[in-house]
Amino acid sequence: MVRAIIGAAVGVVIGMLVLAGAGAWYGYVNGVPTAQLPPGLEAAGVSALSWSVFLFWMGMLPGAVIGGAAGFGSWLVRPKEPRFPSGV
């Protein structure tokens, strides 16, 4: 069960990084119209922050579900026993 919790935590982190990256890309390409920022690095930073703050659930929820399912699946499947005992 610990693997499922660790998988969910890793999924949350990766989901938030993907969400911030998407926000940065959007700001870099399109700018931030509400803050009247033209496209560029400053708009990328503002957009990444605003996407992460306001849309955090869109990164955390799918990441936690997918990571938790992967961790739970690895908990269910145990490694195979060796066919021959060692030393033979």
Image: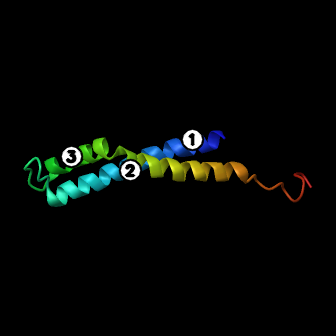
- For the residue marked with disc 3, what is the amino acid? Gly
Q: Quadrant of residue 83?
A: bottom right
| Residue receiving disc 2 | 58
Q: CA distance from mark 1 to mark 2?
A: 19 Å
Q: Earlier in the sequence, mark 1 or mark 3?
A: 1
- For the residue marked with disc 1, what is the amino acid? Ile
Disc number at residue 45? 3
- For the residue marked with disc 2, what is the amino acid? Met
Q: Nearer the viewer, residue 83 or 73?
A: 73
Q: Position of residue 6 (x, y in %)?
A: 57, 41
Disc number at residue 21? none
Q: Position of residue 80 (x, y in %)?
A: 79, 56
Disc number at residue 6? 1
10 Å crowding of disc 3: few (<14), some (14-19), many (20+)? some
62 to the left or right of 72: left
Residue at 18% x, 60% y: name it: 29
Q: Earlier in the sequence, mark 1 or mark 2?
A: 1
Helix, strand or loop for disc 2: helix
